[in-house]
Image (tube, rainbow, N blue to C red):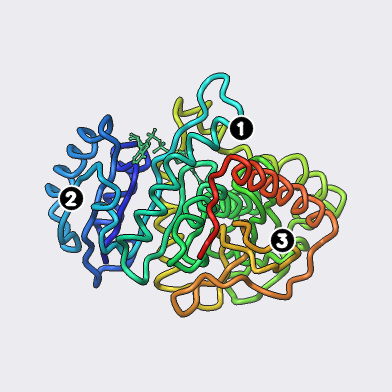
Amino acid sequence: MKVTVTGAGGQIGYALLFRIASGAMFGPGTSVDLRLVEIPAGMKSAEGTALELVDCAFGTLNSVEVTDDPTQGFDGTNVALLVGARPRGPGMERADLLTANGAIFAPQGAAINAAAADDVRVLVVGNPANTNALIASAHAPDVPAQRFTAMTRLDHNRALARLALTLEVPVKALSNVIIWGNHSSTQVPDITHGLLTSSDGTTRHLSDVLQEKLGGSTAVGSWLTESFIPGVAKRGAEIITVRGSSSAASAAAAAVDHVHDWVVGTQDAWTSAGVVSDGSYNVPQGLISSFPVRGQHGNLEIVQGLSVDPEVRARIDRSVQELIEEREMVTALGLLTRKR
Ligand code: NAI
C-alpha cells in the first residue's frame, strides 16, 4: 500500500507515521511505501522523521520519501491522509480560515485527481475537516465522492472511552454508539442505539444500563446533556488546557482506526465517519457529514433505517445547518468547482 501523509512534519504526523509503518493500519502482512508531504518550512522536520522511520527497521516499511510537491507525493497513492492544514490565527474570521484552507485542499484535491491510484481513499484530518474534504473532493472530479472522508473517529473513540469509564466496563463491551454531523462543537454523540455486551454474552441497551447506574431516566437525561455530549465535543479543548498542545497521539490512533476499518472492514460492527451524504437521515446530498458506518467490501457504507430520537434529531439539524453554512461560504468564495 502506498500511503501519503501531508503535514508529515507536524505533531500528528509524528505520532501517525510510526504506527502506519509498524503495520497497525493494514496488518502485519501488508508492507507500506510512505510518502511524506510538507511545505518548505516543514521539510526538515519531515526529513528527520523519515530518518527515524528507517531506524525503526520495521518489517512492514518498504520505503519512505519526503517531498514538498503534492503531485509527486500523491503519485500512485492508495491512501491519502490529509493532515496538514492552516490553523485559526488570532482575529481570523471563519471566511479567512476557509479561504486559507481552500488554498491547501483545492490543489491537493487536484493533485490526487491527477496522480493517485484508481482506488485512492482519502481521509481528511486537518480542520475544518468536513469542509476541507468537500473542497478537495470538488477538485477531484475523476475520483468518486465516496472516497473523500473526514475524521470523526476521534470523537467516536472519545465517546466510547467516556461511556466505558462511567459504566466501569471495558471499551470492547460497547457497540453501536454514533457521532452525527460536523467535526466541531456542534457534533452529536448519540447513545440511543448503543449496546453493552457482558462477558457472559448477554446484550443490553446502554440507556437501560445507564438508568440503573445513574438512578433513572431523568438522571440519564441530565448526564447526557450536561456531561456526556459536551464532554465529548469539548474534549479537544480540555486536552489543550491540560497538555499544553492539541491531541496528537489520539488523533493519529483514530486515523489508523478509520483507514483500517475502511480497507479491512468492520464486519457487522458500526463506527462513525464523515462521509458524503446520499440524502440518508435527511442530511442534504453532497455534504460530508458524520454518520454511523460499516466498513464493507472496501467501502464505508452508511447504516440505514435507524430510528432517530427527536432530541438527537434537533441536534443533528443544528450541526448539519453549520455544514450547510460552511458549504455556502466556500461556494461563495469560489472554492468549489463543478464536477465533470
Ligand atoms: P501541526 O501544526 O503540528 O502540524 C501541521 C503540519 O502541517 C505542519 O508541519 C505544517 O508545516 C504542515 N502543513 C501546513 N500546510 C501544509 C500543506 N499545504 N501541505 C503539507 N503540509 C502542510 O498540527 P497537528 O497537531 O499535526 O494537527 C494537524 C491538523 O489536524 C490541524 O488542522 C488540527 O486541527 C487537526 N486535527 C483534527 C482532528 C480530528 O479529529 N479531525 C483531531 C486533532 C487535530
| Label 3, label 2: how far apart the Cα atoms are | 40 Å
- Figure check: 19 above or below 26: above
- Name the amino acid, label 3: Val
Q: Do the residues labelled 2 and 1 touch (CB within 8 Å)?
A: no
- What is the quadrant of residue 205 in the picture? bottom right
Q: What element carries label 1?
A: helix
Q: Is mark 2 on a helix, strand or loop?
A: strand
- Figure check: 12 above or below 209: above
Callout 3 environment at 10 Å: few (<14), some (14 to 19), or many (20+)?
many
- Indicate if the residue with disc 3 has its beta carbon within 8 Å of ligand 1: no
| Label 1, label 3: how far apart the Cα atoms are | 22 Å
Q: Position of residue 176 (x, y in %)?
A: 63, 66
Where does label 3 land, which residue?
Answer: 283
Q: Residue at x 40, y 70 (%)?
A: 263
Where does label 1 land, which residue?
Answer: 94
- Figure check: 69 above or below 63: above
Say which of 140 and 168 sits in front.
140
- Name the amino acid, label 1: Arg
> Which labelled disc corresponds to residue 65?
2
